[in-house]
Amino acid sequence: MSVRYAEAVWEGSLKEGIGKMQLGSGAYKGNYSYASRFEEREGSNPEELVGAALAGCFSMALSSDLGKMGFTPTRIKTKAQVHLERVEGKATITKIELKTDALVPGIDELSFLKKAEEAKIGCPISRALSAVEITLNARLSKGEVAV
Protein backbone atom coordinates (compact mmCIF):
# COMPACT_ATOMS: atom_id res chain seq x y z
CA MET A 1 0.00 0.00 0.00
CA SER A 2 1.10 3.61 0.31
CA VAL A 3 2.14 6.21 2.84
CA ARG A 4 0.63 9.69 2.55
CA TYR A 5 1.58 12.80 4.43
CA ALA A 6 0.50 16.29 5.28
CA GLU A 7 2.14 18.99 7.33
CA ALA A 8 1.24 21.94 9.49
CA VAL A 9 3.19 24.89 10.83
CA TRP A 10 1.92 27.02 13.72
CA GLU A 11 3.45 30.36 14.67
CA GLY A 12 2.57 32.32 17.79
CA SER A 13 0.25 31.89 20.72
CA LEU A 14 -2.97 29.90 20.54
CA LYS A 15 -5.38 32.82 20.15
CA GLU A 16 -3.21 35.28 18.24
CA GLY A 17 -1.13 32.84 16.19
CA ILE A 18 -1.66 31.55 12.67
CA GLY A 19 -0.96 28.27 11.02
CA LYS A 20 -0.64 26.78 7.58
CA MET A 21 -1.66 23.26 6.59
CA GLN A 22 -0.57 21.57 3.39
CA LEU A 23 -1.19 18.22 1.78
CA GLY A 24 1.88 16.34 0.63
CA SER A 25 0.52 16.24 -2.91
CA GLY A 26 0.25 20.03 -2.99
CA ALA A 27 -3.45 19.77 -3.88
CA TYR A 28 -4.40 21.86 -0.82
CA LYS A 29 -2.61 24.53 1.16
CA GLY A 30 -4.42 26.85 3.52
CA ASN A 31 -4.29 29.02 6.60
CA TYR A 32 -5.96 28.23 9.89
CA SER A 33 -6.27 30.03 13.19
CA TYR A 34 -8.01 29.92 16.54
CA ALA A 35 -10.75 32.09 15.04
CA SER A 36 -11.27 29.86 11.98
CA ARG A 37 -11.42 26.79 14.20
CA PHE A 38 -13.46 27.92 17.18
CA GLU A 39 -15.21 31.13 16.11
CA GLU A 40 -16.46 30.38 12.56
CA ARG A 41 -14.12 32.94 10.99
CA GLU A 42 -12.43 32.82 7.59
CA GLY A 43 -9.82 30.13 7.05
CA SER A 44 -9.65 26.39 7.32
CA ASN A 45 -9.40 24.06 10.29
CA PRO A 46 -8.34 20.48 10.96
CA GLU A 47 -11.94 19.31 11.42
CA GLU A 48 -13.03 20.23 7.91
CA LEU A 49 -10.03 18.34 6.54
CA VAL A 50 -11.13 15.30 8.58
CA GLY A 51 -14.62 15.74 7.12
CA ALA A 52 -13.28 15.97 3.57
CA ALA A 53 -11.16 12.86 4.12
CA LEU A 54 -14.12 10.88 5.42
CA ALA A 55 -16.51 12.09 2.70
CA GLY A 56 -14.00 11.20 0.00
CA CYS A 57 -13.10 7.83 1.50
CA PHE A 58 -16.76 6.86 2.02
CA SER A 59 -17.72 7.86 -1.53
CA MET A 60 -14.89 5.78 -3.02
CA ALA A 61 -15.69 2.79 -0.79
CA LEU A 62 -19.36 2.95 -1.77
CA SER A 63 -18.43 3.11 -5.46
CA SER A 64 -16.19 0.07 -5.01
CA ASP A 65 -18.85 -1.91 -3.13
CA LEU A 66 -21.49 -1.07 -5.74
CA GLY A 67 -19.10 -2.04 -8.52
CA LYS A 68 -18.59 -5.46 -6.95
CA MET A 69 -22.37 -5.92 -7.27
CA GLY A 70 -22.28 -4.92 -10.94
CA PHE A 71 -23.54 -1.34 -10.52
CA THR A 72 -21.62 1.72 -11.69
CA PRO A 73 -22.69 4.89 -9.94
CA THR A 74 -23.17 7.93 -12.14
CA ARG A 75 -22.42 10.17 -9.17
CA ILE A 76 -22.02 9.95 -5.40
CA LYS A 77 -22.05 13.25 -3.52
CA THR A 78 -21.26 13.15 0.19
CA LYS A 79 -21.20 15.92 2.77
CA ALA A 80 -19.63 15.47 6.20
CA GLN A 81 -20.59 17.61 9.18
CA VAL A 82 -17.95 17.36 11.87
CA HIS A 83 -19.13 18.32 15.36
CA LEU A 84 -16.45 19.87 17.60
CA GLU A 85 -17.57 20.27 21.21
CA ARG A 86 -16.08 20.63 24.66
CA VAL A 87 -15.92 17.34 26.57
CA GLU A 88 -14.44 17.51 30.06
CA GLY A 89 -12.95 20.89 29.14
CA LYS A 90 -11.23 19.64 25.97
CA ALA A 91 -12.17 20.29 22.34
CA THR A 92 -13.36 16.94 21.00
CA ILE A 93 -14.83 15.66 17.75
CA THR A 94 -18.02 14.12 19.13
CA LYS A 95 -19.87 13.13 15.98
CA ILE A 96 -19.61 13.17 12.21
CA GLU A 97 -22.78 13.17 10.15
CA LEU A 98 -22.48 11.87 6.60
CA LYS A 99 -25.16 12.82 4.12
CA THR A 100 -24.89 11.17 0.73
CA ASP A 101 -26.98 11.37 -2.39
CA ALA A 102 -26.17 8.93 -5.18
CA LEU A 103 -27.38 8.24 -8.68
CA VAL A 104 -26.90 4.53 -9.34
CA PRO A 105 -28.75 3.21 -12.39
CA GLY A 106 -30.51 -0.13 -11.93
CA ILE A 107 -30.04 -0.67 -8.18
CA ASP A 108 -32.94 -1.06 -5.76
CA GLU A 109 -33.11 1.17 -2.70
CA LEU A 110 -32.65 -1.58 -0.09
CA SER A 111 -29.46 -2.88 -1.76
CA PHE A 112 -28.13 0.66 -2.05
CA LEU A 113 -28.80 1.46 1.61
CA LYS A 114 -27.14 -1.78 2.72
CA LYS A 115 -24.00 -1.04 0.68
CA ALA A 116 -23.93 2.56 1.93
CA GLU A 117 -23.97 1.37 5.55
CA GLU A 118 -21.22 -1.17 4.82
CA ALA A 119 -19.08 1.55 3.19
CA LYS A 120 -19.60 3.82 6.20
CA ILE A 121 -18.30 1.12 8.53
CA GLY A 122 -15.57 -0.26 6.30
CA CYS A 123 -13.77 2.65 4.65
CA PRO A 124 -10.24 3.22 6.02
CA ILE A 125 -10.98 6.71 7.38
CA SER A 126 -14.12 5.48 9.19
CA ARG A 127 -12.07 2.70 10.71
CA ALA A 128 -9.41 5.19 11.84
CA LEU A 129 -12.14 7.35 13.41
CA SER A 130 -13.83 4.43 15.19
CA ALA A 131 -13.88 6.32 18.51
CA VAL A 132 -16.21 8.91 16.95
CA GLU A 133 -19.92 8.38 16.30
CA ILE A 134 -20.49 8.44 12.55
CA THR A 135 -24.06 8.63 11.29
CA LEU A 136 -25.28 8.23 7.74
CA ASN A 137 -28.24 9.64 5.86
CA ALA A 138 -28.13 7.96 2.44
CA ARG A 139 -30.47 8.78 -0.43
CA LEU A 140 -30.76 6.99 -3.74
CA SER A 141 -31.54 9.68 -6.28
CA LYS A 142 -33.89 9.14 -9.20
CA GLY A 143 -32.43 12.05 -11.13
CA GLU A 144 -30.07 14.89 -10.29
CA VAL A 145 -27.81 14.48 -7.26
CA ALA A 146 -27.94 17.19 -4.60
CA VAL A 147 -26.74 17.17 -1.00
Image (cartoon, rainbow, N blue to C red):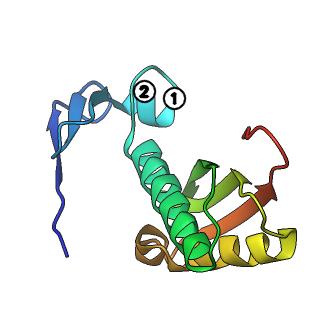
In this picture, residue 107 sits left or right of residue 38: right
Q: Is residue 144 left or right of residue 115?
A: right
Q: Nearer the viewer, residue 73 or 8?
A: 73
- Residue 129's x, y, as percent? 46, 71
Quadrant where the image shows the C terminus: top right
Asked whether the residues under the numbered discs 2 and 1 touch, taking CB atoms below 8 Å apart as contact, a structural biologist would say yes
Q: Residues within 10 Å of mark 2 (few under 14, many from 20)?
A: some
- Going by the numbered disc 1, the residue's amino acid type is Glu
Q: How many marks?
A: 2
Looking at the figure, which quarter contains the N terminus? bottom left
Is residue 43 shown above or below 84? above
Q: Is residue 62 left or right of residue 130?
A: right
Q: CA distance from mark 2 to mark 1?
A: 5 Å
Q: In the rendered image, which residue does mark 2 sit on? A: 35
- Residue 30, position in %: x, y? 28, 28
- Circle 1 is placed at which residue position? 39
**78 or 91, which is in the foreground?**
78
Q: Position of residue 57 (x, y in %)?
A: 46, 61
Quarter-of-image position of residue 37: top left
Q: Secondary structure at mark 2?
A: helix
Label drawn at residue 59: none
Q: Amino acid at mark 2?
A: Ala
Q: Residue at x 27, y 34 (%)?
A: 28
Residue farthest along the top direction in this orientation? 42
What's the residue at 80%, 56% (across, down)? 139
In the figure, residue 36 lies in which quadrant? Answer: top left
Query: In this rendering, would 107 be left or right of 85?
Result: right
